[in-house]
Amino acid sequence: MRALVTGATGFIGSRLAATLDRPVVLSRDPARAKKSLGDVEAYAWSAEREPAPVAAFDGVDVVFHLAGDPVADGRWTPEKKRAIRDSRHLGTKNLVDGMKQAKSGAVLVSASAVGYYGNRGDEVLYEDALPADDFLAIVCREWEAAAQEAEAIGARVAIARIGIVLGRGGGALEKMLPLFKLGLGGRLATGRQWMPWVHVDDVVGMLRLAATRATLSGPFNAVSPNPLTNREFTTALASAVHRPAILPAPEFGLRLMIGEFAEILLASQRAMPGVMQAAGYEFLFPQPREALQDAVRH
């Protein structure tokens, strides 16, 4: 399988690239990508500004599209929100335009996020659940629609609605762990909101299955089959680092400190991996205890 990867220097992308045989990489900085990833074939691409380079698709069987401006990096200023939206919508549109120009017959496996569903309380969310209409849900809807345009050239398109990704060296724990290791962690607000967590190795496994399973198309929830409430997650993470978690973050404090992004931390998404379970995917880390123990190992 000859693969092309966008977002290959990111947390998920770098793990995925490491499982592939000399993948093609699209990057703003090809030299940095080669230095970071090793044996890759790298092409320069400004995702929001131009179609992906035609030459990059030569002989490619599958395109893994994981690029996007980090959602959890800084306050959601108007400029930040524009970067989040454009990097996904325009970036995906330009990727598909490159595929069209190259007359590529590759499968497209594109990232999206569980933010598609918005704040849904205790509702169990499978892939056929309706989308919300908040900012991140709108971003996800545009992102997915842009990816599905590849179907016009006969491409099979699978879309990973990725949850809260756990693993060593990045993801959701990168900012949480220092506080929890100091015993300064705690639940967010009431802690009743559902967290659709998933181990990064399972995200990679699901992406690869989506690439190779010819009958799999459309959206799939890239989440664990055992979601936790934030209160349960907080207890499990504190246990994994052998520290107490007694300092809850009140809702008003979160909104004051991080503004609109607090909505994402407080949203409840009880998403389930229905499509992947039906496809027979076997989770490497189905339980939170083992996933967190692996994620906090040095």
Image (cartoon, grey):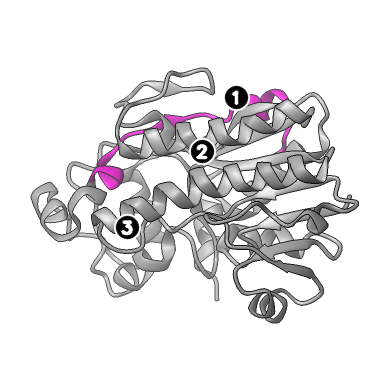
| Label 1 crowd bin: few (<14), some (14–19), many (20+), radius 10 Å | some
Instruction: Give the quadrant of the C terminus.
Output: bottom right
Q: Amino acid at mark 1?
A: Gly
The one of 23 and 46 positioned closer to us in this rendering:
46
Residue 184 falls in image quadrant = bottom left
x and y percentages locating residue 11 in the rendered image: 56, 63
At 29% from the left and 58% from the top, the residue drawn is 79
Q: Earlier in the sequence, mark 1 or mark 3?
A: 3
Which residue carries the number 3 mark?
80
| Label 3 crowd bin: few (<14), some (14–19), many (20+), radius 10 Å | some
Label of residue 274 in the image:
1
Q: Amino acid at mark 2?
A: Trp
Which residue carries the number 2 mark?
143
Residue 52 falls in image quadrant = bottom right
- Asked if residue 282 lies in the magenta stretch, the reply is yes
Label 2 sits on a secondary structure element that is helix
Label 3 sits on a secondary structure element that is helix
The one of 182 and 274 positioned closer to us in this rendering:
274
- The reply, left or right, for residue 53 in relation to residue 85 is right
x and y percentages locating residue 45 in the rendered image: 64, 63
The boundaries of the magenta stretch are 263-283
Q: Nearer the viewer, mark 1 or mark 3?
A: 3
Residue 92 falls in image quadrant = top right
